[in-house]
Image (cartoon, coloured by chain):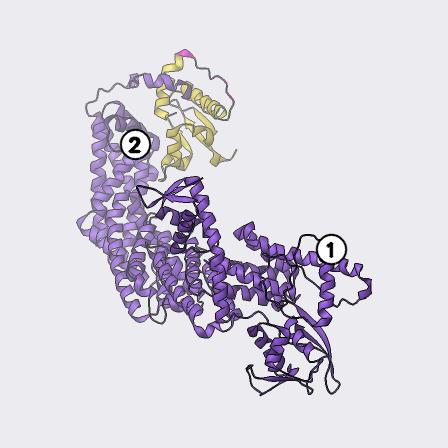
Amino acid sequence: MKKEDTVKLISAEGFEFVIDKEAAMVSQTIRNMLTSPGSFAETEHGEVTFPEISTTILEKICQYFYWSLQYSRGKETDFHIEPELTLELMMAANYLHT
Amino acid sequence: MSNNNQKKRNFQIEAFRHRVVVDPKYAEKTWKILEHAIHEIYNHNASGLSFEELYRNAYNMVLYKFGEKLYLGLMETMTRHLVEISKSIEAAQGGLFLEELNRKWNDHNKALQMIRDILMYMDRTYIPSTHKTPVHELGLNLWRDNIIHSEKIQTRLLNTLLELVYRERTGEVINRGLMRNIIKMLMDLGSSVYEEDFEKPFLAISAEFYKGEAQKFIECCDCGEYLKKAERRLNEEMERVTHYLDAKSETKITNVVEKEMIANHMQRLVNMENSGLVNMLLDDRYEDLGRMYNLFRRVSNGLSSIREVMTSHLRETGKQLVIDPEKLKDPVDFVQRLLDEKDKYDNIISSAFNNDKTFQNALNSSFEYFINLNPRSPEFISLFVDDKLRKGLKGVSEEDIESILDKVMMLFRYLQEKDVFEKYYKQHLAKRLLSGKTVSDDAERSLIVKLKTECGYQFTSKLEGMFTDMKTSQDTMQDFYAHHPELGDTRTLVVQVLTTGSWPTQPGVTCNLPAEMSALCEKFRSHYLGTHTGRRLSWQTNMGTADIKTVFGKGQKHELNVSTYQMCVLMLFNNADRLTYKEIEQATGIPAPDLKRCLQSLACVKGKNVLRKEPMSKDIGEDDAFFVNDKFSSKFYKVKIGTVVAQKESEPEKQETRQRVEEDRKPQIEAAIVRIMKSRRVLDHNNIITEVTKQLQSRFLANPTEIKKRIESLIERDFLERDNVDRKLYRYLA
């Protein structure tokens, strides 16, 4: 995997997730971060820190990104969400515009 | 998340619980961070900024109901920057003005994009719910109000743009890329900005420019040159649009050029002396004509003014062609000239006028108009065909024959008096068939087929009858000689049996055949009547030919090809050396005009004068005397004595044909009246006239007075009656 094709997402606890840019761009917010014309710090370093998203939630979000990519390519499976995560996950989704 | 979307919409999303705001200065602090970021962005200093942080701050501000503060702050900050920017643009000198404007515009655009990205959450939620202007649009509006519409920039910008266009029009090279960017900016700011701040003044100043230029050109250029210039200008403007204007401006600016350069000077151009349309037509200037067509097509009434001038020119020249007595001397030339004229215009229409149907119609109606100005046109066209079929088509390929015949048919179509043509055609065809002079049977038949498709079976049935007669006669002759073996192999007599009515025969015209001939003729008559009962044969001596072997006084032997009349005359000299006109007339019984012509061709044509006459003169007098010309000589063994070849008719003959045509029309008019009345039962006078004229149009143009006479005749014969109350009404009596 080439470095420029990936992006590092960092959780509030400092946990790092390296995922494909393509997957990360499922989030409209992340897409804007990475494509905005000016060079923001995120674009330059290829990493985004989310001080308000916990590791558990960010992990679930990353899973969702990949699931969503596959879903959009026609693989229609269910995405399981543990009930206790639902609220936080929804707020994060609103934030990430997913 | 997409599978939660539905739910999400129904939920009222609350703030992150662990961040419930307590700090009253929270909004102010957060805004400061964002305001600072906006400054940095405008100062090209964004690389240190964290997108996530800014986004989160904006997100939170909106979430905590500080959306309005954020929005107003953005507006205020951006306006402040734009005011600065406008100052720096204003300060730019001369040519740098546009470049500075362009550079700042690019900066602003980029900054705007970044600002929109970090404020995306506001764009997404706060703005739609409060019906405010989205960030991007807001940025454009602020640019418009603070830069483009700023007092010191607005007019300067417009003047600079118009100046550049002017310089380009006068041949200078300008920076089209820059121009395109600036125009694109105006378009991005909304179509009303482009239209108000550039397009309208641009069109107005262009109109003025082209008005002046057109005036200048029209004074000093000829028509072709002017059109070339106008075309170039038009193309330039279209090119300009593709290079740096809005595509929607194309029709507008071309309309301006069309109006100023073409529409306003149309009449003057078409009628320009020495170079206008008429001269182009005369000189076959296809390129100029094509240009004129394509340019004039763009303006209303453009094509119709070309068409009108062309039509009147065509009618005038056509009229000259058909009524100039000089040009009527040779019928073949006459028709050839018409065909050439038609070809010329066909070419012009196909190569310069885009095969325009309306032009073709104008051409056709013009030809129809002037061909019928000359009452002899039908005769001449038939003579032309006769000439072609007699000798003109030798060695010409089949396709060429077809194309010549097709062209003739085209002229035929223009004729109003098609029945007159038929009359002449019948006469000429008869002569061709009887003298065996026709070059190609196929061509003859092909023409008949064409006439048939054009005018119907009735028109050609008699012509076809003539062909049938020729064929039957061959069989009859074979039969005759088979029954009379004593006559030997050489066929001294060849008889063509012609059906009365099919051929242009003249009843009662006959002459006294030499005794040797009459015996043979009698034999044929009894043979023919023996096999076909109930028929009557009469000799058409005016139509035959004969080959006679002659030995002249000094022993010259020749075979003379002559007409039956000429043969009768020559045979008399077997028993006499000198005969006077009166004697010949008495002995042969040939009608005087025919005899005179026949003697003329025997005695007065140089090189073919087998007879000698006293006194020597060009005309035949009633007191002349004739001798065999013993000094006759010719390089050829066979000598063809000029028979009565198809020629233009003389005046009395013409009258006669005319009269026959009139006679023939009567029953046709009557038939048409009866047909119409039979279906309509009752009709008033004017309607009958129109209907009859319409029905007979394909054959001739019926004369209303003649129709009236025919109606009266039909009333006399109890086919029709007048209505008792309304005398203009006629009833059909079954």
| B60 magenta-colored | no
B217 with respect to B409 (left or right): left
B255 with respect to B361 (left or right): left
Co-location on one chain, circles 2 and 1: yes
The x and y percentages for residue A13 are 39, 22
Q: Residues within 10 Å of mark 2 (few under 14, many from 20)?
A: many
B164 with respect to B239 (left or right): left
Which chain's colour is purple?
Answer: B
Element carrying mark 2: loop
Give the amino acid type for the residue marked by disc 1 in the picture. Gly
Q: From which residue to which does the magenta span run? A: A75-83
Mark carried by residue B530: 1
Q: Name the residue at the left extreme.
A: B151
**Which quarter shows the N terminus of chain B?**
top left
Q: Nearer the viewer, residue B708 or B528?
A: B528
Q: Nearer the viewer, residue B549 or B64?
A: B549
Q: Name the residue at the top extreme.
A: A83
| A79 magenta-colored | yes
Which chain's colour is yellow?
Answer: A
Work out whether B112 lies above or below B298.
above
The x and y percentages for residue A33 are 37, 33
**Of the two numbered discs 2 and 1 in the rendering, the one whose residue sits closer to the viewer:** 1
Is residue B60 in view?
A: yes
Element carrying mark 1: helix
Reading the image, the residue beneath label 2 is B119
Q: Residues within 10 Å of mark 1 (few under 14, many from 20)?
A: few
Work out whether B615 lies above or below B272.
below
The x and y percentages for residue B712 are 39, 50
Q: Which sits earlier in the primary sequence, circle 2 or circle 1?
A: 2
- Residue at 39% across / 64% down in the picture? B315
**Which quarter shows the C terminus of chain B?**
top left
Give the amino acid type for the residue marked by disc 2 in the picture. Leu
